[in-house]
């Protein structure tokens, strides 16, 4: 076997394992949904591609991924440009990281769904710029359930006030809630956070807000999140392997 054959084989093996990892994620999502008496098709898998190069994103798309999550506008823009001629137009890009106010304009041109609406100021800015573009920007409100979490997010006690004000904005549509619980080794320790987000959502729905989407669960805990009602799980490491940075 020549050198190029070996390289070819290595590439093939790597691709096979990416496909295997993705099918493993889909399988575990399905099983978790069925354990909870849910329809597995209610749950969308986002491949989180921060630090992952465009070629590997394309392989994930070839393996069936339809939603890509990025946490930085600049990084996303480069990859979207690199893939614009090859990626099917049905593939969606979602913003899952904190959105700086000076990045709203490019973000609105790239992202189908922003998971990280985390302040009234950001909502006002998104609404204003979306109006300029004649777009209704779909968003999820990021909820901060504890002090150990990332610094961003709306505290539960302010959620309804925010929903009230955002519901008057013509160019934003809030479709649900998102949370990033503190990192804990044992996924069972994270379960109460997921349950809390779902209950918050349920209470708000009883009061008339339409919040079908729950974005919760990452590589270490997505099965628990699906058992607790996640409709979107955000998976990086379990699909692409450990990240070198980020
Ligand atoms: C990086 C990231 C993820 C994915 O994390 P993994 O543990 O690698 O699956 C999910 N959500 C957000 C907001 C992230 O920044």
Image (cartoon, grey):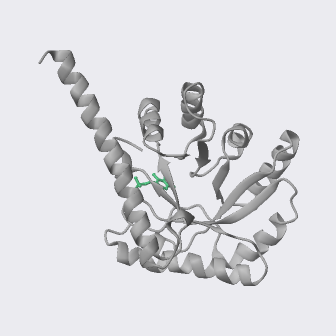
Percent x, y of residue 126 = 77, 50
Percent x, y of residue 85 = 59, 24
In the picture, which quadrant includes the N terminus? top left
User: How many numbered callouts?
Assistant: 0
Percent x, y of residue 150 = 51, 62
233 vs 14, left or right, is right
26 vs 70, left or right, is left
169 vs 99, left or right, is right
Residue at the image point whose x is 43% and y is 40% from the top: 60
Answer yes or no: is residue 70 visible.
Answer: no
Q: Residue furthest left?
A: 1
Say if 162 sits above or below 4 in the image: below
Q: State the image quarter where residue 80 is shown.
A: top right
Q: State the image quarter where residue 135 is shown.
A: top right
In the picture, which quadrant includes the C terminus? top left
Percent x, y of residue 36 = 46, 79
């Amino acid at each position: 076997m020549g050198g190029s054959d070996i390289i070819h084989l290595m590439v093939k093996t790597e691709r096979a394992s990416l496909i295997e990892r993705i099918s493993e994620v889909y399988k575990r999502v399905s099983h978790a949904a069925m354990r909870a008496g849910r329809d597995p098709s209610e749950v969308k898998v986002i491949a989180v591609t921060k630090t992952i190069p465009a070629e590997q994103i394309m392989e994930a798309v070839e393996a069936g991924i339809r939603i890509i999550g990025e946490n930085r506008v600049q990084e996303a823009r480069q990859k979207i440009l690199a893939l614009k001629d090859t990626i099917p137009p049905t593939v969606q890009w979602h913003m899952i990281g904190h959105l700086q106010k000076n990045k709203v304009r490019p973000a609105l041109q790239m992202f189908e769904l922003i998971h990280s609406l985390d302040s009234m100021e950001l909502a006002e800015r998104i609404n204003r710029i979306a109006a300029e573009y004649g777009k209704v920007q779909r968003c999820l409100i990021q909820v901060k359930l504890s002090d150990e979490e990332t610094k961003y997010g709306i505290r539960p006690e302010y959620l309804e006030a925010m929903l009230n004000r955002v519901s008057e904005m013509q160019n934003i549509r809030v479709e649900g809630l998102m949370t990033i619980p503190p990192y804990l080794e044992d996924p069972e320790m994270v379960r109460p956070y997921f349950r809390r987000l779902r209950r918050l959502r349920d209470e708000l729905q009883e009061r008339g807000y339409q919040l079908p989407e729950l974005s919760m669960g990452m590589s270490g805990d997505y099965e628990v999140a699906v058992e607790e009602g996640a409709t979107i799980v955000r998976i990086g490491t379990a699909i692409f392997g450990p990240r070198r940075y980020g």
